[in-house]
Image (tube, rainbow, N blue to C red):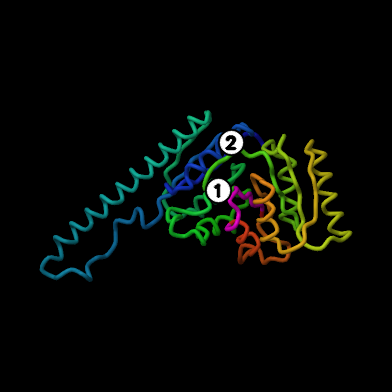
Amino acid sequence: MTPTQKIVAFIDGSIYSESVCHHAAWIAERTGAAVDLIHVLGPRDTSGKRDHSGAIALGARTALLQELAELDAQRSKLMSHRGRAILDDAQAILDKDGVTGINTRLRHGDVVEAVAEVEGDARVIIVGKRGEDADFAKGHLGSNLERIVRTSTRPVFVASRAFKPIARVLVAYDGGASAMKAVDHIARSPLFQGLSIHVVTVGAASAEVEKGLANAKAMLKAAGLEAATSVLPGQPEKALADLVDTQGYDMLVMGAYGHSRIRSLVIGSTTTAMIRACKVPVVLMR
């Protein structure tokens, strides 16, 4: 990845937005990349053309329709002002964190369409684990997050609820194409230089598994990164989540899909479980 590529951070005003900003600043500091802050106004935030006529008595139809249209227009304007305020607050956080190259964008439409439009020159896409209803949906992922992971061609950095400095990185490696891509990404990116890296395969040890881990370690070593490797028994989602908690890892990197998953249809079940379970950022590679 070239230094000219941007960090694209999507913020929605949720409790995760501040964390998204701090993580964007951390990546910017280590890579020298500029940051694009994007807030997307969805259709329900901007629509001013809803048909209310079915609920209006005939005698008051014209006047009330006009009044409702004006209220919808006011709401749309207020949502735009709110979006701009969210972006201004986010820029202030990045300014305080020492980031100099910041661009803010207020976009209209669907967030996945926005990702598709901006990811061409993106180093990474940063999103919060959950959206504006985060406090009411602690057991669920944001629907936009799952859609973004399914469609984005760039690494997706899923920010945790709160930022803390990142020093120790756990890499989930299953030998699949997306896991191999994750290791290659780590080797090529300045983001991981100087960090402690542990590459783990969950399952039964075998000659094939050991060979895969050895190859991953060699690729990282060629890039100047020293990495430990190990094989853990158990189910991936539980074993990895327990390892993150008990060993104090600060970030998890993994392929978004296992090599046996139907990529075009669903996000891998292990991936979904890991994002739900982990209290640290998760970087996903397709």
Which quadrant does the C terminus fall into? Answer: bottom right
Residue in view at x 29 percent, y 62 percent: 50
Residue in view at x 33 percent, y 56 percent: 47
Amino acid at dot 2: Trp
Task: Say which of marks 2 and 1 sits in front.
Answer: 1
Residue in view at x 12 percent, y 65 percent: 60
SS at badge 2: helix
**Name of the residue lying farthest toward the front:** 246
What stretch of residues is rendered in magenta? 276-285
Q: Where residue 41 is drawn, which disc sits there?
A: none
Disc 1: which residue: 160
Amino acid at dot 1: Ser
The answer to if 284 sits in the magenta stretch is yes
Expressed as whole percent of the image width and height from the top left, the position of residue 180 reads 75, 52
Q: Which badge, 2 or 1, is on the more N-terminal residue?
A: 2
Dot 1: few (<14), some (14–19), or many (≥20) neighbours within 10 Å?
many
Q: Where residue 26 is drawn, which disc sits there?
A: 2
Expressed as whole percent of the image width and height from the top left, the position of residue 133 reads 43, 56
